[in-house]
Amino acid sequence: MYFCYNVMDEAAKCGNMKQLQRFHNHGINFTEKAMDLAASNGHLNILIWLFKNGGKCTPLAMDLAAENGYLDIVVWLHNIGASCTVCAMDMAARNGHFDIVLWLHINRTEGCTTYAMDWAAEQGHVEILNFLFKNRYEKYTKYGLFWAAKKGQLDILKWFFYINYDFFEIFDICYAVELTKKNKHKKCVNYLNMIIDDKKEDQCIC
């Protein structure tokens, strides 16, 4: 998160074109934070003005635009040659911006990390989970199960065991049960206990 001390950067953050132009006419300069902040807050017109007036951005611009759901800005930044990091797809997945996840997958090469699926699981975005599982190699970790359990995402828990029943060990599932109990997600507790019982039978554990 940026803290603004430059009045031009603050104007860009707030989408205030009149202030930007006034300050610019008085010889006040902006920094590269200006474009990052404008992108983060969805101000495409400000981005265009800054770029025409010599503005540059960091990879954070596209990352933040993706995180906050501004596909038009992600595309525009891509078209002017801006870069991003894996955080773009990770955070878009976390916040449920499937259109951005899809666009980044098709048009960019940075990819994502396992956080993309783990965070999507935590937030209950099953459509994004399906897409990432089928189209990306990064996959997910046990934290996806834990975070989904903590949030009471029953449909996501069912998805995990439907997709790959053998991925999680019994002790992982037991920990997930504790998380669901602590957060009073009774249906999730019942479902996970059923999975544990089934796995014990499969493994002949008494």
Image (tube, helix red, strand yellow):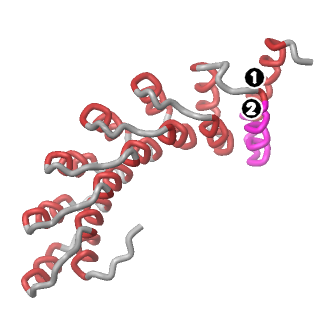
When the figure is inspected, residue 9 is found, relative to residue 144, above or below; the finding is below
The main secondary structure of the magenta stretch is helix
Q: Which residues are magenta?
A: 171-188
Quadrant in which residue 5 is drawn: bottom left
Q: Position of residue 20 (x, y in %)?
A: 16, 77
163 is higher (above) or lower (below) than 104: above
Name which residue lies at 28% across and 70% down: 13
Q: Which of 39 and 187 lies nearest the eye of the viewer?
A: 39
For residue 27, what is the image quadrant?
bottom left
Instruction: Give the residue number, with chain letter if any, for mark 1.
Output: 195
Magenta stretch: includes residue 184: yes
Type of amino acid at the residue the image marks with label 2: Ile
Q: Earlier in the sequence, mark 1 or mark 2?
A: 2
Residue 84 lies, in percent from the top left, at: 30, 49
Residue shown at 73% from the left, 33% from the top: 172
Residue 173: numbered disc? 2
Q: Is residue 68 left or right of residue 196?
A: left
Q: What amino acid type is highlighted by mark number 1?
A: Ile
Q: Residue at x 32, y 41 (%)?
A: 100
Instruction: Pick whichever, 157 or 6, lies toward us.
Output: 6
Task: Tell me the residue at 64%/35% (across/down).
Answer: 142
The CA span between labels 1 and 2 is 8 Å
Give x and y (percent) for residue 77. 20, 51
| Residue 93 on the magenta segment | no
- Rendering quarter of residue 93: top left
Tell which of 43 and 35 is nearer to you.
35
